[in-house]
Amino acid sequence: MPILLQIDSSADASTSRTRALTAAVAAAWRGRGVDYEVVVRDLHADQLPHLRTPAQHWPRRLREGASIPDDLEELQRSVLDELLSADAVVIGAPMYNYSMPSTLKAWVDLIHVPGVTASFDEPSQPLAGRPAVIATARGAAYDPGTRTEGWDHVVPPLQLVLGEGLGMTVHVVATSRTLAERVPDLGARRAAEELEAALAEARRLGSTI
Ligand SMILES: Cc1cc2nc3c(=O)[nH]c(=O)nc-3n(C[C@H](O)[C@H](O)[C@H](O)COP(=O)(O)O)c2cc1C
């Protein structure tokens, strides 16, 4: 049965745009048939620990003698197995201080393992070609040609890790100006239009990836 792994990381449980986008992808995925399953991991509600040792970045054979405690090994194995079992992934990635939430970064640090999920001394990309949707939301605007173009440090590292590192086929759904109600200059109407367009794209991806 095809499995979508839905990952959320917004600290906002009620009005989150990224949660709305990941939910739209998941609903469209489920709509493809009764056997289309969604596994949810909420990184804000159930926070993963940060790395305790750099050895966690490597498989045992590349750890150069370092060891890691059994509980950490088990936790990382279960997070990796969950990802490796998924046919597709959607990741809610809100912008926090121009970067991704630390809860999401903790997940990235656990799943990007050279020699396991990414190639290192030998080719290893078990997730190559599988789709990954990055669903991002930011309070302000980072449009091309503006002063803030290039200030988004959420999407590029995720594209690098998932696309370059893991070889996945990456799609990006973005909505901006989400703080328009508090900052009228951002334009409430444009913000609403961007959200509608992003939701439509999320539904499209959920039914086609
Ligand atoms: C801790 C925190 C930091 C934020 N930093 C930024 C920022 O650097 N730039 C920005 O445009 N918006 C920033 N925002 C606004 C969020 O990106 C915006 O509210 C977005 O919609 C959050 O995603 P969500 O709706 O899924 O929760 C920040 C919000 C929070 C809570």
Image: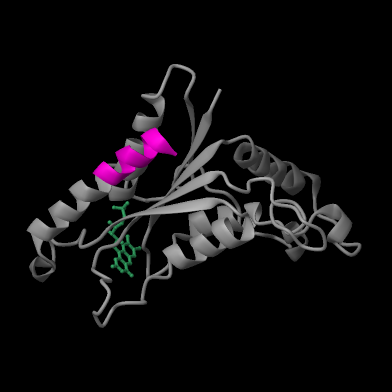
Measuring from the top left, give residue 31's x and y in whole percent: 36, 24
Residue occupying the far top of the picture: 34
Camera sees residue 14: yes
Q: Quadrant of the C terminus?
A: top left
Measuring from the top left, give residue 103's x and y in whole percent: 50, 55
- Ligand 1's quadrant is bottom left
* Magenta stretch in the rendered image: 200-209
Identify which residue, 47 or 113, lies in the foreground: 113
User: Residue 45 in magenta?
Assistant: no
Identify which residue, 126 or 177, lies in the foreground: 126
The way the protein has been coloured in the rendering is one colour
* Residue found at x 43% / y 64%: 154
Say whether residue 160 is left or right of residue 155: right
Identify which residue, 56 or 25, lies in the foreground: 25
* Residue found at x 64% / y 40%: 84
Q: Quadrant of residue 106?
A: bottom right
